[in-house]
Amino acid sequence: MIKMRALLGGLFALALMLSTHATYAGQPRHMTIAAAADLRYALDAVITTYQRMHPQDVIEVTYGSSGKLLAQIEQGAPFELFFSADSEYPKQLVAAGAASGDPVPYALGHIVIWSAGVDAGKLTVADLARSSFDRIAIANPEHAPYGKRAEQALRAAGVWDAVQPRLIYGDNIAQTAQFVASGNAKVGIIAQSLALNPQMAKKGSYAVIPASLYQPLLQSFVVTRRGAGNTLAHDFAQYVQGAEARGVLSRYGFSLPSAAVEH
């Protein structure tokens, strides 16, 4: 009888342990991503495809300009992953000791001339010098990579001095696009990834700005120091480098860096 009780007790303890482990394993994982505003639609789509396979995982995203997000992370903001529109910002995070691992390139971005009021498909950067474009929207070059590239393109085309008095600055590239979509600016220089969103495509048209007019927009992500022990952050980082996620990014106009790993 004593042996039977001991056996039953052992089986009960084992069952409890397995049950506890199964409950823990089934608990939803959570992380928060800081992402450049050019990813507002593309990254949302990537997360949707990821969560079809992992519906229990909870992923939240804060979008903004890469420079401001970098500053927030350095000041201790609770982000586990940082998707930047410029690879230099993740490098700075590593140098500051606020990252876990090295930056990983995930896309090459492109800028376009976009308008909801005129046929932007026929415009060139030089055309923006026309006085009819009384308001031209770009992202703030001081902390938004797409704004910096817009300034470079305007300077390279020789029209910076002519258009500068007419520029209005978005805090990030998504806000810049909204300025144009709402009519607060007649035309703007925005991310192609935003112009390809179906809702934006219905509202306006765009022309791709030649890449020769600005420095390449190589975009990278990095796991933050806070995300070092977060398994969801590492799993999602791997997923973004795989074929399915890369296919989504490609549909939103991003070129794909050859360094990305196929899975």
Image: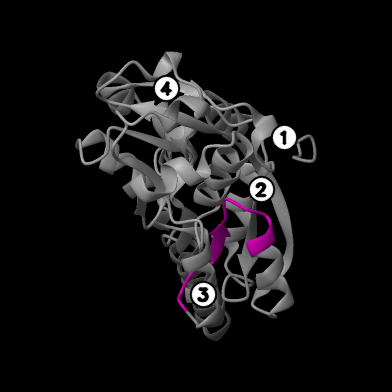
| Helix, strand or loop: magenta stretch | loop
Residue annotated with mark 3: 71
Cβ–Cβ under 8 Å for marks 3 and 2? no
Q: CA distance from mark 4 to mark 2?
A: 33 Å
Residue 152 place in picture, x, y as percent: 60, 45
Q: CA distance from mark 3 to mark 1?
A: 33 Å
Identify the disc placed on residue 206: 4
Cβ–Cβ under 8 Å for marks 4 and 1? no
Q: CA distance from mark 1 to mark 2?
A: 9 Å
Q: Secondary structure at mark 4?
A: strand
Q: Secondary structure at mark 2?
A: helix
Tell me where the magenta segment starts and ends, as one range: 77-89
Q: Secondary structure at mark 1?
A: loop
Q: Residue at 52% across / 59% down in the picture?
A: 66
Q: Earlier in the sequence, mark 4 or mark 1?
A: 4
Cβ–Cβ under 8 Å for marks 1 and 2? yes
Q: Quadrant of residue 117?
A: top left
Tell me the kind of residue under disc 2.
Gln
Q: Earlier in the sequence, mark 3 or mark 1?
A: 3
Q: Earlier in the sequence, mark 1 or mark 2?
A: 2
Task: Decide if residue 156 is on the left or right side of residue 145.
Answer: right
Q: Secondary structure at mark 3?
A: helix
Q: Quick one: label 4, few (<14), some, or many (20+) residues within 10 Å?
A: many
